[in-house]
Structure formats: C-alpha cells, structure tokens
C-alpha cells in the first residue's frame, strides 16, 4: 500500500493532487495505463491505443484544414492549412461574411458555437485563439452569408478521458514505473470523468476560470498556450504551487 504522507507541517495542506474534493456528483471509470512513465495522481488521461487504455497527455499537436462551404455565391477561398496552436478546440470553426464587398467583414465561431473573433476579407486574421493566421481571399463576388470553415484535428491528446484519482491501492514500486505518487504502467487506475478534484496550480488562477494543463510540470493554469481540459472550471483561486479545486462537467 502506498503511503499518503509521513511528515506534517504546522499548517496541513487543504488537499492532495488527485483527491476528490467534496461529495458533489462524481463519476469515475477504470482504465488501464499504457504510458511507460505511468500517470501521476491529479493528471489528465487521454484515450490510448488498446481497449480501455489511457495515456498521459503530452505536447500539443494538431492540424488545420480550411475550406469554402459548398453553395457559396462568391468564389473566395480560405487558407488551406492554417497553423494550429494550443488553445484551439478540436472541431470546426466557422467564418460567415456579414457584408458584400471585396473587404467584407465576417464573424468567427468556434466548434461550440461561441463567437471568438471577427475579421475582414483579404486581410490576414491573427486574432483567433489557437489559429496562428488565416486569410479569406476576395476572389470573385464576396457575398453576405458566404461561409468558410477551418477544421481542427488533434494529433496528440486526441480524446480526454478524465483526471487520475488519488488512491492508496497502488504498489509503491512497480516494474517499468518512474513515479511513485500515481498509477504505474499496466495498472488499472480510477479516472474522474465528472466531479470536484484538488490539483496543483502552476500560476495564478481564479475561481470560474477555464482550466489548462502544462505538460512540462504537470500543473494547471489559465494560460491558453497550454493543454485545454474540456468542460473544466477552476472552483477556487490560488497561485503557483497552491492546491486548488477544479470542477469537471459540473459548472
């Protein structure tokens, strides 16, 4: 049985990474760890290659594909392969022209239908989070309601499963594992798909903020250049190194 803690400070920690924070509605699933380094408690897990397998997340990687909607009146085009960076959501971004001219304005919505920016035809757009730059050309007649797409496909961290749950039912040392406070490779671990959990902040975060994960140190931030944890919200505030609470699919 792994040991939670063997020495104590004057002020005990409010929680431990991976600890379920309260008795709100919570759901956990069992999955087999495929990553050779294992998955530490409180870390995000993504779908692996085998049945019921999960892997630890890594550096962000994704591709983007631009296209014009079939049936557009105009003959404009959009950048074929825009560069995608962390902060972009997987799925289809949509740009809709709101005027008829060679420099018509347009509105961009993300895969969840949220307006994330605006732009103008024939001008490079660098304002959409996670999409480095793209341009809608002004070939032919640019007509109001003409529509263009950017499809974002993740090539790493493809399918988020859940957050690794702290448990004492883990061997303290296991063959092939390079961590102690977590699930070693080939171990069946518990992963929270919904609920409240304590994690370690990697920068100042605020209650209600979106949750991002920094793969370089395993901490959580509000920095959009890190890995976005879908449907997760910070439920308490804190600074770098503090234990904070995140809510998954409850806020």
Image (cartoon, rainbow, N blue to C red):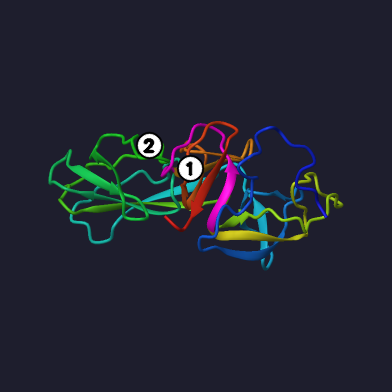
Residue sitting farthest toward the bottom: 51
193, 14: nearer the viewer: 14
Task: Identify which residue, 209 or 131, lies in the foreground.
Answer: 209
Residue 238: % across, % down:
51, 35
Name the residue at 42% across, 41% down.
130
Classify mark 2: residues with Cα within 10 Å, few (<14), some (14-19) or many (20+): some
Q: Which mark is residue 236?
A: 1
In this rendering, is residue 65 above or below 7?
below
Picture quadrant where residue 15 is located: top right
CA separation in Å, label 1 and label 2: 34 Å
Q: State which region is magenta.
A: 195-209
Q: Position of residue 143 (x, y in %)?
A: 15, 50
**x and y, in percent, of residue 243 in the image:** 58, 40
Residue at the location (58% across, 57% down)?
162
User: Image check: 21 left or right of 102?
Assistant: right
Mark 2 or mark 1, which is nearer the start of the sequence?
Answer: 2
Residue neighbourhood size for the residue with mark 1, other residues' Cα within 10 Å, grouped as few (<14), some (14–19), many (≥20): some
Q: Residue 208 magenta-drawn?
A: yes
* The C terminus - image quarter: bottom left
Percent x, y of residue 234: 47, 45
**Which structural element holds mark 1?**
loop
Mark 2 and mark 1 in contact (Cβ < 8 Å)? no
Vertical order, 77 against 159 (above or below): above
Q: Is residue 140 magenta?
A: no
Q: Which residue is mark 2?
A: 133
At horizontal 22% and vertical 57% (from top left) the residue drawn is 72
The residue drawn where x is 51% and y is 63% is 25
Which image quarter: residue 14? top right
């Amino acid at each position: 049985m792994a040991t939670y803690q063997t020495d104590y400070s004057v002020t005990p920690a409010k929680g431990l990474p991976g600890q379920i924070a309260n008795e709100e509605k919570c759901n956990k699933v069992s999955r087999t760890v495929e990553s050779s380094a294992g998955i530490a408690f409180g870390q995000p897990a993504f779908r692996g290659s085998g049945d019921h397998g999960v892997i630890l997340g890594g550096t962000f990687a994704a591709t983007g594909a631009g296209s014009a909607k079939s049936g557009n009146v105009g003959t404009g085009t959009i950048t074929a392969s825009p560069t995608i960076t962390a902060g972009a959501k997987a799925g289809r971004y949509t740009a809709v022209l709101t005027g008829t001219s060679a420099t018509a304005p347009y509105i961009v919505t993300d895969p969840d239908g949220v307006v994330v920016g605006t732009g103008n035809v024939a001008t490079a757009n660098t304002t959409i989070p996670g999409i480095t730059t793209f341009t809608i050309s002004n070939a032919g007649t640019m007509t109001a309601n003409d529509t263009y797409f950017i499809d974002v496909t993740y090539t790493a961290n493809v399918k988020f499963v859940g957050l690794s749950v702290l448990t004492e039912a883990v061997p303290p040392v296991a063959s092939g594992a390079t961590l102690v406070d977590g699930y070693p490779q080939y171990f069946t671990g518990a992963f929270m798909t919904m609920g409240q959990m304590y994690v370690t902040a990697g920068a100042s975060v605020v209650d209600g903020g979106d949750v991002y994960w920094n793969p370089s140190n395993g901490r959580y931030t509000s920095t959009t250049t890190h890995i976005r944890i879908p449907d997760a919200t910070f439920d308490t505030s804190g600074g770098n190194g503090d234990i904070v609470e995140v809510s998954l699919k409850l806020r």
